[in-house]
Image (spheres, helix red, strand yellow):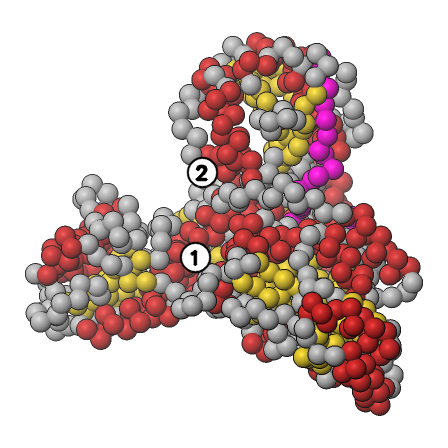
Amino acid sequence: MTIRNLEGLFRPTSIAVAGPSRLPGGALKLLLDRLAQSGFTGPLSLVGGSESDLADMPERFSHARAIEDLATPPDLLILTGAPGEAASLVSAAGAAGTRAAIALSAGYDRWSAEDSHAALLAARPHLLRLLGPGSLGVAAPASRLAAHLGACEAGAGDLAFVARSGTVVNATLSWARANGTGFSGIVSLGQRSDVDASDLLDWFALDYRTRAILLHLETIVHPRKFLSAARAAARSKPVVVLRSGASRERSHDGITHAGRIARPDAVFDAALARAGVLRVDTLDEMFEAAETVSRLKPVTGRRLGIVATGGSLATLAGDHLKRLGGELASLSEETTGALASLQRPGLAEANPLTLDETAPSERYASAASTMLGDRNVDAVLTVVAPSPFVDMSETANALASLATPGRGGHARRKPLLVALTAGAPLPRKALDAARVPCHGTASESVRAFMHLARYAEARDQLMAAPPSLPTDFSPDVESARAVVRATLDRGETWLTPPDVRKVLAAYGIAQVESRFASDPAQAAAIATEMLPAAGRLALKLVSPELPFKSDVGGVVLDLTTPEAVEAAAGDLLARIATTHPQARVTGIVLQPMVRHAHASEIFIGLADDATFGPVIAFGHGGTGVEVMGDVALALPPLDLNLAEALIRRTRVSRLLEGFRDRPRADMHAIALTLVKVSQIAIDIPEIREMDLNPLAADHRGALALDGRIAVAEPVVHPGRSGRSRLAVLPYPQEWERMLTLKDGSTVKVSPVKPEDEDRYRRFFEEKVTPEDLRLRFFAPVKEFSHAFMARLVQLDYARAMAFAASDPASGEILGVVRLHADPDHQTGEYAIIVQSGLKGKGLGWALMQLIIDYAAADGIATIKGEVLKENTTMLAMCGALGFSVHPSPDDESIAEVTLPVAAGHTAAD
C-alpha cells in the first residue's frame, strides 16, 4: 500500500486515544490538550485509560471503556498503551471502520518484532494504516490536527516534513517557529512497520497545499518503491533529503576496485540524484534549503548577482559562490551603466556591487531591482550589514517590496535572497510576508542559492531527452550468459581472461588484443606471433586469488622478444609461488603495449550495493583509482544522457575535454561504453562486480586494456522481484512484439522510451488532426514543447506504461496507448490515440487489448478512463471491450469508463 487510507492520518473525521497510557509523566495530558485546543471539529474520545488518564481528560473528550462502545467509530486511533495490547485494539478499530492508527511515543519506543508484526497483521484485513511504533505523531495544520508530542506546535504553511528521528522533528519545529516557517504536514516515522517515507512522498506529491517536501532518513528498506515515489514527487515539487547514519556504516569489502569504491553512502547519493532529489548534509543546510525551495521558483542557471554593504562582504560572498560551483553573473553594459551611480565611489566592478555604509534603503532596492532585470542574471543576493547610519529594518522592508505582488519589480519572476548580518533577532517580518528567503550570513544565502540551482538541474535531468543509441548495438546476450553460467557451474567466482573477452565482445566493448598462456613456453610461442605487429608486449599474471595484479608485481611491461617473454613469465610465476604459495595461478596474459600519446586512463566499474543493487562507477583510471577519489557513481539503467552526466561529475572529464595540444576525447564513445556496461548489469544478474581498468580514452574512442569480472548466483534484494536486482526498472523489452491488424498488415509495438521524443512529436504534428488531439487532451493543443513531450516519453515503468505502434519499415509512429497506475497500483488510467488516417483498421482495438493484458500482468485491478461524450467511436470501442460507461459526476460533457481486470486476463479477440 502507499496512500490508501492516509486520509485517516491527515484528514480524520474523528479521533480516539487508547490507553491506559504508558507515556511518561505529562505526555498524555499534553497530547489530549493539544487535540482539544487545536480547533479540530470532529469527535474526540479517550478509550480505556487509568484513573490518572481520566483525570487528564479535557471536557472536549468523551470516554468509553472499549472501541466498540464509541458512538462514533474513530477515523484515527492513537495508541498510547502497552505494545502487547496494540494488536487487539487495532483489530477492533479496523472492524469498526478506523482508517489509520499512530503508535505514539514520547521517545524512540522500539517494540519487539513480535508485537509490531502482530499489530500489522491485525491492521491489514481492514486496510488500516499504521504509523510507528516509536512515532512522535502527526501534525496537519490545515486539518487542525495536532496529534503529536513535538516540542512545539506547527504553524500552517506549504512545507511537508517527514523524519525518522523524533529529535530531528523537535529541532525542525523549533527552527520553524523562530523563522516563521509553516507546514502542510509533519510526520514522525518511528519504526516504519507500515507507513514509510515512500508512502508519504506519494501523499504530499499529490497534496495541493504542499510546495516542497523535506525528508530525514537513515535507511531505505524498499528502494524501488522509494525511488519511484521520489522521482514522481520531484517532477512536480522540490524534494530535499537529509540522511544520517553514514558514519556508522562499514567500508564495503569489495573484491574489485568498483566494489571498494561503491560505499553505501555514495550509492545512496547516486540514487537520490537519479530520482531528481536534492540531498543536504546537515540540519543547517536542510533549514537553508527549506527557507529557499519553499519560497522561490527554481532558477535557470548558476549566475548570481550580488549587492553588499562594503567590499569585504561582497568579495566574501563571491568567493564562497565560486567555491560551491556557482558563478558571478556577467552584467550587460546597460546594467553596468545603470549601477555606476549606485556603487561606492572609486570602484569599477559592478558584480559584486559594493555599497557604502551610508547607503539608504532605496539604494539597495534600486540596485537589486536593476540586477534582477538583467537577462544574464539568474538570481540576486543582497547582503546588508548593520550601520549606525541606516535602519536595517527599513532596508529589509524596501527589499521585500520588490517581491510584493502589485508593486512591480523583477523579484516576482527571479529569486531574490537577502542576508541580514545583524545577529538574532533579524528584522525579517516584511521579508517573510513577501516570501523572500532571509539568512543571517551571506554564506548561508549563497548555499541556499546553490540548492535552488542544483534542484533545477536535477529536475532538468529528469526531463532530458537522450540521443538514440546506435542502431547496430545489438548485444549477443545469450552467448554472454552462457559464459557466465559455465563459470558458475564449475564452482568458480571469477571469469577467466578469455571469458572476460567473450563477454565484453558480446556487448561490443572495444578491447586490446589479449592472448592467454598457461606456461612460459606457450607464452613465448604466442609472443612470436604477436611481436611483429605489436613491437612490445605486456605480460600479466592470472590468479583468482590475486585480482589486483599490480599489488603483487604481477605486471611486466615492454617485452620485445620471445625469449624475454619466456624469462619474464618464468620469473613471475616463481616469485608468486614463493610470496603467495596459497594463491592459485592459472596462467599469464600477453597484450600489445598500447602507446596513445594523447590518451587518458579512465575507469569503468560495476558493483553491487546491498540496498540499491547494481551501481556503475566511472572515473580516473589506473592502479591508484581508489586513492585518487575521482570517481562518480550512477544507478543503471543508463541512457546516453545519464552516462554523459556521470562523466561530467568527475575531474578527469576536464582532461577528456582536451587542452593545449591534446584533442578532445570521443565522449560519445565513452558514454556508449558506460551504457553497454549498464546493459550487462541488466541482462546478466550473475555478474556482481566488474573492473575495466584502465581504458585508454582519446579522440579515437575508448579501449579497454584490462578487465576482470566476478560472478555469483543472483541475490534477491529487498523491495525488488527475484528476476531483477535493479532499483530502477529497466526498459521492458519483453513487451516488444508484432501485432497483426484486421487487414492482415503487421505493426511493431514497443514500450515508449525517452529516445522516442522526436518521432512522437512528429506523430502529433504531422499525423493527428487538431480535432483528434482535442478529443485526446480535452482541449486544443498548439505546441508540443520539450516539457510537454517529456511527460509522455519519460516513463517510470514501475508506475506507467505506454506502447507505441510503429511502421516496421519506416519507424513512423502509428498510434500510442498508455496506462498510468495510481500510487496504490490498484487502478490505472488509460489514454489512446492513433493516426487520424488509420481509423477503422483495428489498430486502436489491438492496442487496447495489449494494454489490458499488460494491466493484468502488472497486477492492476481496474482500468479507468475519461472520454468526451462526443467521442462516440471511443465509447463504442470501450463498450465492446467490456468497459462500463457512466456519466462523470464532475462534468456533464465527460463519460467515465471502467473495466475490472482479472489476474491472468486475456483480452477478447
Which sits in the foreground, 495 or 529?
Answer: 529
| Quadrant placement of the C terminus | top right
Q: Within the image, what quadrant is residue 112 found in? A: bottom right
Residue 831, disc: none
Q: Which residue is mark 1?
A: 454
Q: Which residue is mark 2?
A: 787
Does residue 901 appear anywhere in the picture? yes
Separation of marks 1 and 2 at Cα, in angstroms: 18 Å
Give the crowd class for mark 1: few <14, some 14-19, many >=20 residues within 10 Å: many
Residue 763, percent from left and from top: 52, 25
Q: Amino acid at mark 1?
A: Arg
Q: Residue at 66% across / 26% down in the picture?
A: 808
Query: Where does the magenta region start and end?
Result: 718-742
Residue 286 belongs to magenta span: no
Residue 667, percent from left and from top: 52, 56
Residue 724 belongs to magenta span: yes
User: Does 846 appear above or below 223?
Assistant: above
- Magenta stretch secondary structure, dominant: loop
Which sits in the foreground, 65 or 210?
Answer: 210
| Quadrant placement of the N terminus | top right
Give the crowd class for mark 2: few <14, some 14-19, many >=20 residues within 10 Å: few
Looking at the rendered structure, the number of numbered marks drawn on it comes to 2
Does residue 121 appear anywhere in the picture? no
